[in-house]
Image (spheres, rainbow, N blue to C red):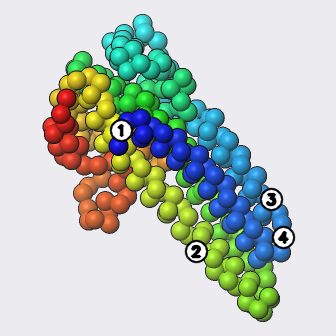
Amino acid sequence: MTLYTQRSKNIFKTWSLMTLFVLFIGALGFLFSYWFGDNIFLFVALFFSLISAFVSYWFSDKIILGISHAREVKREEFFDLYNIVENLSITAGLPMPRVYVMDEPSPNAFATGRDPKNSVICVTTGLLSILNKSELEGVVAHELSHIGNKDILLASVICVLVSVISLLANWLSRSLFWGGGRSKDDDNGMGLIALAITLVSVILLPIAGTLTQLAISRKREFLADASGSLLTRYPEGLILALEKISKTNIPIKNVSEVTRGLFISDPYLKKKGSWFASLWQTHPPVEERVRALRNLEI
């Protein structure tokens, strides 16, 4: 698979996920409306899903930057960082993204935005304090690759939709908790079938959404590592940066479960666990990423 086909697939995945999200939430609203005998659930679910899909596309970057407490910076404030982003953007043939900084001692970075023209690269002050120029170039090239590969739209949209799914599932489960609805004899048991399907959906939907987000996050990290190294022609810079970042045991304060997968390295400090625990990891192990980079032919 080439980088160009991956970009096209990411765009297709984005619109497919948004469409499935609207359809599924609408179906869930219909089941609740059927069970409670009130169409308000259907109307609220459809309105909520359409608004969420719209907001996730147009404003996901602002939401993510707000959660992260990141601030935009200019060349005179972070001269070296700004120049690296500018030079690598020219090399990659991409528009210059806006540069943001998080005042966090933990070394990390992420990219967001709906397209290359509206993209952002954000790094922590902790990252700037421990990396040399070639290592910082490796990290910036990695994040620019997310932008060039159209990962940022897919990842940003998923972040917002997973958050919305969790909120909606919580609201619907509370509605069920407070009771009401059809009796067990209504419509030859169809009411109970609708209730059973609704209960399963409310329980499994947030889990399925989170697992989808994590699987996509892990896969895109390998691709961005490879394409970023091709951009700098120096994989060792990113390798050394990843190793330095992985040795840090300082968690990031301004991060949530929905933004966790955007960072170049997991901002939460998690110990290695079983294969089941690995399902919930946002990033591949650093050892696997380093091994893949060392086997990369440039």
* Earlier residue among tags 4 and 3: 4
Quickly name the residue at label 1: 2
Any mark on residue 43, and which? 3
Q: Nearer the viewer, residue 186 or 129?
A: 186
Q: Residue at x 28, y 65 (%)?
A: 275
Q: CA distance from mark 1 to mark 3?
A: 42 Å
Q: Quadrant of the N terminus?
A: top left
* Earlier residue among tags 1 and 4: 1
* Earlier residue among tags 1 and 3: 1
Q: Position of residue 240 (x, y in %)?
A: 18, 31
* Earlier residue among tags 2 and 4: 4
Q: Residue at x 58, y 50 (%)?
A: 16
* Earlier residue among tags 2 and 3: 3
Q: CA distance from mark 2 to mark 4?
A: 20 Å
Quickly name the residue at label 4: 38
Q: Residue at x 71, y 61 (%)?
A: 26
